[in-house]
Structure formats: structure tokens, C-alpha cells
Amino acid sequence: PSFPRVFTTQAASMASTAGTLDSPVKQIQIEGMVVLKIIKHYQEEGQGSEVVQGVLLGLVVEDRLEITNCFPFPQHTEDDADFDEVQYQMEMMRSLRHVNIDHLHVGWYQSTYYGSFVSRALLDSQFSYQHAIEESVVLIYDPIKTGQGSLSLKAYRLTPKLMEICKEKDFTPEGLKKANIGFEHMFEEVPIVIRNSHLINVLMWELEDKSTVADKHELLNLSSSNHLEKSLQLLMDRVDDMSQDIVKFNTYSRNLSKQQQQKHQYLQRRQQENAQRQSRGEPQLPEEDINKMFKPPQPPPRMDTLLIAGQVNNYCQNVKEFTSQNLGKLFMAEALQGHN
């Protein structure tokens, strides 16, 4: 999928709140309507692993980011050459402002397939947003986990360390080591609170009273093999990618060590030759740029490896949460069966 970028500097300044944040965003408050819009967007346009994305609108109040509205990115193919994503966003925000609806840009959202969202495309997009609009967040919606009866909506921001690395564009092993960046220091999760008006709360109470008993038993469904099998399969694929990256790094280390040995042998031979020339009264060999003769091999990109490690960690956390919930259900079912 094509990941959104912050339109332009001019649009970003129009979309963001004025000034810089006095304190970092510590909590996100989302209107229930925004959550329903995101869910509806996926149900209408998302199929399987297809990703849907959209823009988040709202405002910052002290250290709380309030998300009050959103609108989706329309699905378009390569044939839609005339479609201008920047112009579309600007027109939508202008229209919302005309009807007195919050139009300040505070981030974006996207759906995920079994928690597969940690990627270079998401990193670049979130950096673009967060660099232009300081309070920006990305909301990750998991429709599969939500379909099992538990709303899965998480908010992430890039950590200050990773923002500095992305600004300098220094993704070399030395740069990442100097910044002390690990996969656990790339994204920070911000707690979410869903807020509804009093009228909506009353409506939800009425709907709950009218709902059938069968709907309430969905959370006690004990079948988990399909979800767990797919999660483990995706985990294995990323572990394979990690092992391939390790092989590349080991190859680079061997080539670098081999070149260092050749460089050392060349310097020894040159030193011996100069000593013999000096004993014969001949001039020494001319100075040569040894770095041009022995160009160091290019190190493999380490950022991709960090992202793979972050995705593996995310899969492990999802499997841990899922299995712990299912173990609780199994113990509950066992107790109920023994009681009967």
C-alpha cells in the first residue's frame, strides 16, 4: 500500500496547532464516532490483508491529544494518475473548516493484518508527520482481533532518539550504536481513552439491553487454532528474514576482516621493501593512499534489521496476549464443566 506523507510545509503549518508543545503528549482521547468511522472504513474498503488509511483531526489540550474527527484516504490504483492526494486532503480540511468542524491535522490511522505494521514505510510516514506536526500520532486498528470481541486500537509515536536519527539520516551501524537505538526504543505507545457524550452512553445502555444473549457469549469462544496458527506463521517468516540479515552481516564482517588482513600484509611488505631500499641507498617508495587501494565493504543497512526485530517483538506480544486470554477461557470452561 502507498503510505501517506505530510502534504507540504505550507499545508502542515495550516493543519497543525500553533507553536510547539510545552509537554509531550501523554494521553489520547478519542471520540467514539472516530472509532466507528475507522471500523466502518475497513468494513467497506478493506479485505483480508489490504490496508486502509485515513487522516486524524483534533486538537491538543495541555498534555492530552483529543481526536474529534477523521476522514479516509480514498482507494486508488496506478491508473488514477490524475488523483492528487495532497489536493484531496487540503480540500477535505477546507470543507470541514467551513462547517465549523475541527480541521487541525493531528496524525493518521491505518489498519493492520495480524499486527503486521512495523515497516520502513510506516517509519518514514510517521517521521514526516511528526517532524512537521509535533503532536502527530499513528493509530493502528486491528480488525481481526476486534472481530473476536476485543477492540484493538493502539496509538504510537516515534521516540525522540529515533527522531534525531531520522533527521540526520545516519542509519549506519556506528550511528545507531552511538545513539543507543534498539528495537524497543523505536516506537512509544500512548494510552488511549475513548470518550462518548452522555446521549451516546444512554443509547449504548439501551442497545445492550436489547442485544441477544448469543452475542454476549462471543468472548467465550474457545476456538483459537486458526488465529494462533496464522500469527505463528507470520512470526516464522519474520524470523527467517532476520536470519537472512544475520547472514548478510556475518558475510560483511568476514569480508571486512579479510580486507584488514590484506591491508596489514601490504603495509608489512611495503615496510620491508623500504628497509631494503634504504640499505642499498635507494629512495623509498612513493606515498600511496591506502584507503583508495583497499576500499572498505559497504555495511548492510541496520535500520531494516531493527524494524524486523520490532515486528518480531510485536508478534510475540500479540501471541502472548492471545494465549493468556485463551488459557483463562479454558480454565473457566474447565471449572464450569466440573461444576455441572
Image (cartoon, helix red, strand yellow):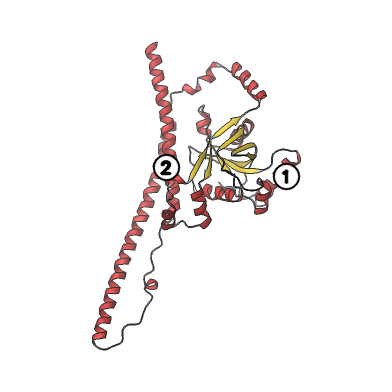
Distance from the alpha carbon under mark 1 to that under mark 2 = 41 Å
Residue sitting at 64 percent across and 51 percent down? 7
- Could you say which disc has been placed on residue 201 in the image? none
**Residue 286 pos. (x, y %):** 35, 82
Q: Nearer the viewer, residue 1 or 61?
A: 61
| Element class at badge 2 | helix
Task: Tell me: 133 left or right of 274.
Answer: right
- Where 166 sits versus 295, above or below? above
Q: What residue is shown with label 2? A: 312
Give the quarter of the image for residue 317: top left
- Residue displayed at 53% across by 44% down: 157
Kindly identify the amino acid type of the residue bearing the numbered disc 2.
Val
| Residue 94 in view (yes/no) | yes
Q: Position of residue 324 (x, y in %)?
A: 41, 28
Whether 72 is drawn above or below 291: the answer is above
Q: Which residue is mark 1?
A: 94
**Residue type beneath disc 1:** Arg
| Residue 73 can be seen, yes or no | no
